[in-house]
Amino acid sequence: MNYKKERIIIEEYQLSIEKVTFKADESTILDAVSFQVKKGERVTVTGPSGGGKSTLLKIIGSIQKPTEGRILFKGKNIAETDPLAYRQSVSYFFQNASLFGKTVKDNLIFPFQIRELPFDQKRCEQMLERVKLDRSYINKAVNDLSGGEKQRVALVRNLIFQPDVLLLDEVTSSLDSDNKEIIFDMLAELKANDQITVISVTHDEREISQADRVLRIIDGKLEESV
Ligand SMILES: Nc1ncnc2c1ncn2[C@@H]1O[C@H](COP(=O)(O)OP(=O)(O)O)[C@@H](O)[C@H]1O
Ligand SMILES: [Mg+2]
């Protein structure tokens, strides 16, 4: 009886962060952080610099492994999930995302290649237009783009296929106000879609005010405020 009840509760959550601890050398960067996220929730993570926010997001994104604790995605331990498959469902996007290859197209082909799907140029051009880059950008050299344009192309690369969960680490904080606005608008559109779960680290008051839930990380410890 009890066992059955517990299973139902577990399956209600899309992500379950269970006592995640991260230690480097002698210091504890994350200290037994636990919380659960439901599908479609918008969670904002704030807190002072150096508190462990980026480390937490990298661990959820499976970019980094926790020293202790585990993360369950749809009830399954991500340490036992194929990383490539996991990254298709849980997309991690950070402040200074880097582009690879020579052209914008080289970057946009990548998400199709890993899914073994044919490249859809029209779809890519439409996505570029959503971040205010006209279709000619597809053939541009990566080296000729400004920092803000690179960030916008990286965002398109992450979002050509919609992930289940989007992890955003201060994605707008190093940008000027025009670039910030463009990225903010695209993300707002995305967040309006209640199928996608968003966990974002931000200091932006506007983003914080739109969150369903605000988590504060201070000295590696979680404080949840409503
Ligand atoms: N792999 C690591 N090795 C050593 N120290 C680290 C490592 N990763 C993060 N840190 C340290 O952990 C602290 C928290 O970092 P971070 O997660 O980037 O915080 P935040 O994103 O909240 O500013 C910082 O003091 C940082 O220098
Ligand atoms: Mg950080």
Image (spheres, rainbow, N blue to C red):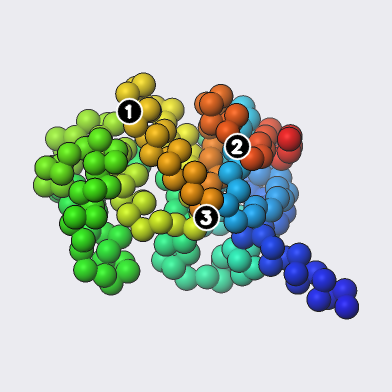
Q: Nearer the viewer, residue 31 or 112?
A: 112
Circle 1 residue:
179
Neighbours of disc 2 within 10 Å: few (<14), some (14-19), many (20+) = some
Choose the circle earlier in sequence order: 3 or 2. 3
Residue beneath the point at 57% across and 52% down: 40
Residue 49 in percent (x, y) is at: 57, 28
C-alpha separation, residue under disc 1 versus residue under disc 2: 21 Å
Choose the circle earlier in sequence order: 1 or 2. 1
Residue 106 can be seen, yes or no: no
Residue beneath the point at 48% across and 39% down: 169
Quarter of the view holding residue 211: top right
Q: Nearer the viewer, residue 66 or 119?
A: 119
Residue beneath the point at 64% across and 68% down: 75
The residue under label 3 is which amino acid type? Answer: Gln
Vertical position of residue 17 compared to residue 169: above or below: below
Circle 2 residue:
211
Of marks 1 and 2, the one in the foreground? 2
Of marks 1 and 3, the one in the foreground? 3
Residue 48 can be seen, yes or no: yes
The residue under label 1 is which amino acid type? Answer: Asn
Neighbours of disc 3 within 10 Å: few (<14), some (14-19), many (20+) = some
Quadrant the N terminus occupies: bottom right
Vertical position of residue 76 compared to residue 163: above or below: below
Residue 123 in percent (x, y) is at: 24, 55
Residue 97 in percent (x, y) is at: 35, 42
Circle 3 residue:
195
Label 2, secondary structure: give it: loop
Neighbours of disc 1 within 10 Å: few (<14), some (14-19), many (20+) = some
126 sits left or right of 206 in the view: left
* Cβ at disc 1 under 8 Å from ligand 2: no
